[in-house]
Amino acid sequence: MILTDDNLKLALETALTQSVIKKDGKKDKVRKFDETLDIVINLRDFDVRNPNNKFDQELILPNALRQGKLSLCFIANGDMVLRVKEKKYDVIDDPGLSELDRKDKKTKKMFAKKFDIFVCQAPLMRNTAKVMGRFLGQMNKMPKPQPTGYGIIKVDENIDKVIENYSKIIKVQTKKSPVVQTFFGKKSFPIEKNFENLKALLSYIESRLPNGAGNIKSIYIKTTMGISTKVIEPEARVKGGKR
C-alpha cells in the first residue's frame, strides 16, 4: 500500500469530522468524553502462524496519550518503595507479594484488575510470576522486558521516566488473524500531535513487515464512537475509486 502524508492526514481529518453526530434540523452533537483515535491495519501476504512474524510490542509514541495520574502499580523493594509513595502511586513489595500469595484466587484476580499497568523491579519478577503470573498473563498485563516492553525495571530506575514512558505507550500485537488494532491519539489533541503518533506507529509496523508497506492491505481510522474512514491511496483517489 502506498502511504503518503497527504492521504494519512486526509483520513485523520475525515475521521475527526465524522465523530460529530449530525442530524438534519438539529444542532451538531459532540460526545461528552474525550474519544480515542483507533486504527485497524489489515495485512496481506503475512502468515501470522509463522512465529517470526508475530510481534507483541509496547511502543513509545512521540506524544503522551494519558493525562494525569496513571493506573499504574509498582512492584518494588528498598528505596524505590518510598520514592513511589512520594509520587502518590501504588506499590507492593516482596513481603506484600508473599502475603498476597496466601490470599484466594478471587483476591488475586481483583488485584490484577485494579490497575491497567504493572512495572516490576527485575529481582522481583520471579516472585511476581509465581504469585500473579496466571492473572496478569490472562489480562495481558504481565510486565515485559526490553526490547519488547518497558515493564521490568532496574533497582535504581528513574521512576519519573517510567511514568513518562507509560503515558505514551501503546500495545501493538498480531494475534490469530493478520490484523493490527490499537489506538494512537485523542480527539482533543492538536491534529499535529495525533499525526506524529500515527506516523510513528505506521513506521514501526512497516519495520516489522517483510515487505514493509507492501504487506499492508488497508487501513481504517476512527474515533471511539465515530465512523471508520479508509486511508485511500493517492492514485485511487485521483481515479475517484477505492482499493
Image (cartoon, rainbow, N blue to C red):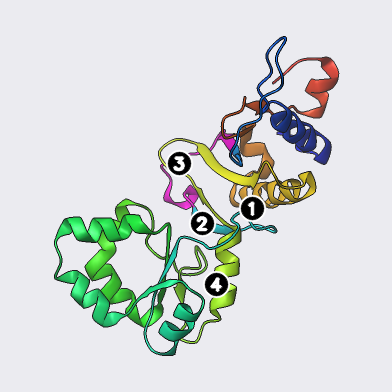
Residue 231: tell me if it is visible: no
Is 123 located above or below residue 167 in the figure? below
Residue type of the residue flagged with mark 4: Val
Mark 3: few/some/many CA within 10 Å (<14, 14-19, 20+): some
Residue 116: tell me if it is visible: yes
Please tell me which of labels 3 and 4 falls first in the chain.
3
Please tell me which of labels 3 and 2 falls first in the chain.
3
Instruction: Return the residue at label 4.
Output: 162
CA distance separating discs 4 and 2: 16 Å
CA distance separating discs 1 and 2: 10 Å
Residue at (30, 52) in percent of width and height: 138
**Where does residue 231 sit, x and y in percent of width and height?**
71, 30
Please tell me which of labels 4 and 1 falls first in the chain.
4
Magenta segment: 39-55
**Disc 2 secondary structure class:** strand
**Where does residue 75 sit, x and y in percent of width and height?**
37, 75
Is 91 magenta? The answer is no
Give the left or right position of residue 191, taking residue 210 as reference: right
Instruction: Return the residue at label 2.
Output: 57
Pick the residue in front: 165 or 29. 29
Residue at (52, 67) in percent of width and height: 147
Please tell me which of labels 1 and 2 falls first in the chain.
2
